[in-house]
Image (cartoon, helix red, strand yellow):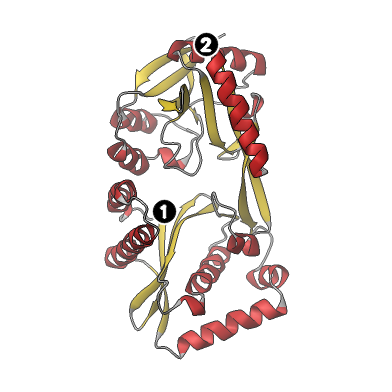
Amino acid sequence: MYKFKVNHFAPKELVEKFQKINQIKKSFFYDKEWLNACTNNHINKKNIYAVEIYLEETILMIMLFEKKKKFFCDVLTWLFDEEINFATPIIIKKHDFKKKDLEELIQRILYYFNVDLMHLDKNPKYIENELNPLNFHNNSHSSKILKIDLKKKQWDEYYQLISSNKTRQTDRRKKKLLLNEGKVEILFANNILEKKDILDFTIQNKISFLKKKNLNTKNFENLYSKLFDDVINNPKYICTALKIDNKIISSIIGRVEKEKYYYIMPSYLEKDFTKYSPGRILLKEQIKWCFKKKIEIFDFGPGSFDYKNQWANSFENYFEILVPKTFLGHIFSVFYKVKKLIKGL
């Protein structure tokens, strides 16, 4: 039987623990820069926890939770589930989890936190190519994550397969029109100054976009200002820009993790340049770069937008876990499932 230990979430101590462990498997959103940025942006720092799972005296994994209010219910969710693209248990030691024992463990965790239900969303099936232990628990389809499978393909072959003659002609025409506007440059930042220019453009342009939509920008600015300050020296973060006459008009912030490229944040100037599709021009170059660097998977992340569908040749279904414990929890669960049916999810 598994046992668990509950600690208040402390990012510094957690990162130190990670550094002492070999072969740890986790979402990169639990790296130091994301944990610090999300914690810095988190208003309520009381109900956040790191739950350690043990078999006898051997720690097997850690799960980061938050206890929060959703409508009329107390809900246990993944910590930072609104800020990050996907959430996972942190696997400390490889272990063959048994479904029955894991379900019993989850029930005991639910009772410990005294919540109405557990709702764990944004779960990938695999964690760094290892099966997600929670995949054995009762779960349902949550979201479709579009991807490009680059393995055993060349750029030209891939581009021919995913685009029509008309699309390729349009791409060439728009790039030619943009060239008529001035000197065009595709920049893959390779020093701090170039990275800073791209990061600054991205966050300021996103803030302007949110303001136009009359959306609150405070949380976004707090999170990404802190994150971008911390990743500027990290070579895993790839900053790419499309410039015209040395002015950035489109950018992409991505992350390379082993054989995968994660598309984290695109941005482009809407005014004056939309007709040239600067976002598409830059995305095309970013995908070509991934082929050149022998990247195997291009992960578009959440959001099934039309432009992602145009490039994707693969997908993954993330799953969610919904475990009601009380009468209120069951009511929430029913309403949530009905809402998903209405939306066609």
For residue 127, what is the image quadrant? top right
Q: Are marks 2 and 1 in contact (CB under 8 Å)?
A: no
* Amino acid marked by disc 2: Arg
Quarter occupied by the C terminus: top right
Q: Secondary structure at mark 2?
A: helix
Q: How many residues crowd around disc 1 within 10 Å: few (fewer than 14), some, or many (20 or more)?
A: some
Residue 124 place in picture, x, y as percent: 58, 38
Instruction: Report the residue marked by disc 1.
Output: 236
| Residue 96 on image: x %, y % | 63, 22
260 sits to left or right of 194: right
Q: Is residue 334 above or below residue 243?
A: above
Decide: few, some or many residues near mark 2? Use Cα within 10 Å; few <14, some 14-19, many ≥20.
some
**Side of 9 where 340 appears, left or right:** right
Task: Residue 258 in the image: state x and y as whole percent.
Answer: 51, 49
- Tell me, yes or no, if residue 39 can be seen here: yes
* x 31%, y 36%: residue: 42
Q: CA distance from mark 2 to mark 1?
A: 38 Å
Looking at the rendered structure, the number of numbered marks drawn on it comes to 2
* Viewer-proximal residue among 224 and 213: 213
Q: Which disc, if any, is residue 108? A: 2
